[in-house]
Every structure is written in structure tokens, then in C-alpha cells.
Image (cartoon, helix red, strand yellow):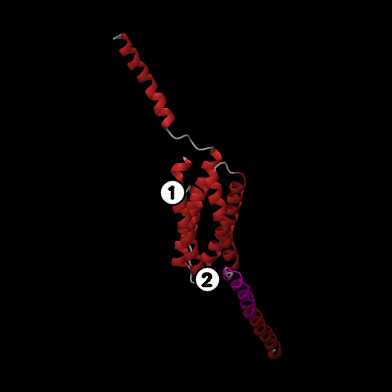
Amino acid sequence: MKKLVLAAALLALAAPVRAQNAQPSAAPPAREKFAQTAAMTDMFEIQAGRLAQQKSTEKAYKDFAAMIISDHTKTSEQLKSMAPKLHVQLPQELDRAHKAKIEELSSVDGAAFDRRFKAAQLEGHKQAIAEFERYANSGDNADLKSWAEQTLPTLKTHLQHAEALPNPGPAPTTGSAAPAHKEPASKEPASKGATPQMNGAQGGSRSE
């Protein structure tokens, strides 16, 4: 009987150890950071592309938007399917910085939108390429490194297309030219008014 009790106690002690060993280990910080950055990039590009399709009046911008929506949707789905095996938690929504960029794009239309959208695309894709190259060269997970290497050509293509987008017209300037035309107009009546006074004075002296 004592042997049975002892065996049961040993099994009870061993159960938590087995359960702990069965749990997936946490991903290294570098892997977690890269996966989260890549997921954030995908979400931002998809949302920014949708805004471009709504707000831009240029066909080149709309076509570019369609391309980045399609490509970043694919990479987002690929990364989500890899996440469980990588033991990483991917973000479900944009962080504060990316939300602010989306709000900024949402506040403008037409050429003003195109200017900010192009600037955001150039900056965002340069940063993404640097992050992907860094992990592809020195990442800790073979599958994620391979995915980064395979995704890099797409990001570089996006950057090339962003650089080739036509530059929108310059931002309109107001209030600088109007005051300059008002000053001469205000001086003319004064100079004309002085002439009759002088003539009147001369006329008075002649009558005397």
C-alpha cells in the first residue's frame, strides 16, 4: 500500500514538469521584434494603399496602391501562418506611430494626399528593406530568414515604383502676393489730391 502511495506521489510531482516541457518556449527578442515589425509594416501598407485608392486622383498612385495591397496581404498571411511555429505574438492593430500616419493621410485629399503618401512610402520601404536585410543576414530562425530573403525583392520593387511616382504639384501658397498690390493703390489718391490744392492756391493768388 505504501508503495502505491509513493508511486502516486511521484506521478503527481512529475505531471507539472511534463506540462512545462510541453509548453512552447518563448521566441528570442530579436525574432519577436522582427516578426512584429514585419506584421506592422504589412498592416500599415494595406491601410495606406486603401486610402490612396480612395483619395488620389492619379492613376499611377491608384495602380501602385493596388500592388502594395495585394503584395502585403500575401506576406501578412504568410507570416501569420508561420507565427505559431515561431512562437511569436503578432500585433492585431497599428501602434500609435502608424495610427498617426494613417490619420495624417486621412486628413488630406488630391495632390496634398499624394505628396504625403509618396513620402510615407519612400520612408517606410527604406526602413523595411533595412530590417529585412538585417534579419536575413543575422536572424536566428532559418524559416524566418528564408522568408525575409524571399520578401526582400518585393519590397525593393515597391521602393522603385514609389520613387517613380509622378511628383504632385507644389503646395499652394496664399496671402503673400495680395498685400503688395494694395500699397500703390493707396498712395495714388494722395498724390492726385495734392495737385488740386496747389492749383487752388495759385488760383487764389491770381484773383488777388
Q: Quadrant of the C terminus?
A: bottom right
Horizontal and vertical percent for residue 180?
Answer: 63, 73
Say whether residue 175 is magenta. yes
Q: From this view, report whether residue 31 is shown above or below residue 160.
A: above
| Left/right of residue 6 with respect to residue 137 in the rendered view | left
Which corner quadrant of the image does residue 31 belong to?
Answer: top right
Instruction: Magenta stretch: give its range.
Output: 168-188
Amino acid tagged 2? Ala
What residue would you read off at disc 2? 60
Q: Is residue 185 visible?
A: yes
Q: Is residue 174 visible?
A: no
Q: Residue at x 51, y 46 (%)?
A: 35
Horizontal and vertical percent for residue 73?
Answer: 45, 57
Residues at marks 2 and 1, CA–CA distance in whole angstroms: 32 Å
> Which class describes the residues within 10 Å of circle 1: few (<14), some (14-19), or many (20+)?
few
For the residue labelled by badge 2, is the local secondary structure a helix, a strand or a loop? helix
Comparing 176 with 41, the one in front is 41
Q: From the image, state whether disc 2 or disc 1 is nearer to you.
A: 1
Horizontal and vertical percent for residue 171?
Answer: 57, 68
Q: Residue at x 57, y 57 (%)?
A: 125
What residue would you read off at disc 1? 81
Are the two marked residues, 2 and 1, in contact with CB atoms closer than 8 angstroms?
A: no
Q: Residue at x 54, y 62 (%)?
A: 116
